[in-house]
Image (tube, rainbow, N blue to C red):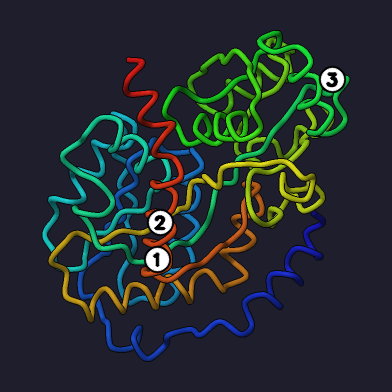
Amino acid sequence: MHRRTFLNTFAVATASLSLGTAALADWKPRRPLNVIVPYSAGGGVDSFARAFAAAAEKLLPVPVVIVNRPGSAGLVGAQEAASARPDGNTIMITSAGSFLMASTLRKADVNPFDSFQTVSQIGNLVPGLFVPANSPYQTANELAEDIKARPGALRWAHTGRGSFLHVAGQGFLNANDLEVGDVPFKGGANVRAAIIGEQVDFGFVGVNVGRGFESEMRALAVSSPQRDGIMSEVPTFAELGLNFLDVSSPIVTFAPNGVDAEIVSGIEALLAQVTQTEEFAELMLVKGNAPAYLNGADAEAKLQAMLEAAGPILENISESK
């Protein structure tokens, strides 16, 4: 999407969203706000956190400090965030879809529902179905028809069994009775390289990872109820008449249990205001993402629905280990 078109669309979409300025005015942190990111610096989740920090520091009297704590599919940083002092000075911004899948599959001591208060969603990493640029498949329907005609003949790539991209891809295949061999890779960049290099016939990767590589690989569809805010020209599976599993990775902010409700409301109001700023939108656009705000209650309900939808696939993965 062209930058000017995107920003105009963004301005219209956010004009009617309540800023929650009263709650923000009541919350006045006196110490730096520490944001734990349970992934390495430079990744997709980290880019959301740093864009939030850049915009939030203009609204707060204290600095915002990004603390990267990678390890164990995000569970190391999540454990540290859950154990932080519940004073409102430490929050976590994470890929909630990945956190949900990892904590469920590993039966971890920390999970999104019991270990935290959900503050709000600020973005969403949407899965996309991509093929190499030279692929004979021009639409997802053509791909599905060929898979049905030749079950087991094709191979597809994802970011590891149990990742949200694997679950989204497998959900699409299961929902349409398609049989394909899967090839796991470590990280979206490696999946992208495998698709571009024609090591696989197709792959599921975040649409943000495909931005800038349009001449080397082609997006056939997004696994989402709505089109992506950046790659808006790519149809959804629903538009094409194909079934899919609504599994994505919302970028969600969590607060440790025990943080005072008024403080949580203040942080939620800050996040709502930040996601409406043009600065946040522009920083996200550079990374191929777009703001996607949901309040805490709606964000948690979304995660609960995703867990229910993904349950059978996660159970099958657990049994096959």
> Taking 113 as reference, is 190 left or right?
right
- Which residue lies at the image location 71% right of the left edge and 78% below the top edge? 12
Residue 261 picture location, percent across and down: 21, 77
Residue 17 picture location, percent across and down: 56, 82
Q: Secondary structure at mark 1?
A: strand
Q: Quadrant of the C terminus?
A: top left
Gap in Å between the C-alphas at discs 2 and 3? 35 Å
Disc with the residue nearer the chain's start (1 vs 3): 1
Which marked residue is nearer to the observer: mark 1 or mark 3?
3
Report the residue marked by disc 1. Answer: 120
Toward which corner of the image does residue 92 lie, by quadrant?
A: bottom left
Gap in Å between the C-alphas at discs 1 and 2? 6 Å
Amino acid bearing label 1: Ser
Disc with the residue nearer the chain's start (2 vs 3): 3
Disc with the residue nearer the chain's start (1 vs 2): 1
Are there few (<14), some (14-19), or many (20+) residues within 10 Å of tag 3?
some
Amino acid bearing label 3: Ser
Q: From this viewpoint, which residue is outermost toward the bottom?
A: 22
Amino acid bearing label 2: Val
Are there few (<14), some (14-19), or many (20+) residues within 10 Å of tag 1?
many
Residue 131, compared with residue 284, is above or below; it is: above
Toward which corner of the image does residue 119 lie, by quadrant?
A: bottom left
> Taking 13 as reference, is 22 left or right?
left
- Which residue lies at the image location 88% right of the left edge and 30% below the top edge? 138
Report the residue marked by disc 2. Answer: 252
Are there few (<14), some (14-19), or many (20+) residues within 10 Å of tag 2?
many
- Which residue lies at the image location 59% right of the left edge and 46% below the top edge? 126
Residue 26 picture location, percent across and down: 28, 88
Which marked residue is nearer to the observer: mark 2 or mark 3?
3
Residue in the foreground of this view, choosing between 59 and 98: 98
> Taking 207 as reference, is 272 left or right?
left
Report the residue marked by disc 3. Answer: 135
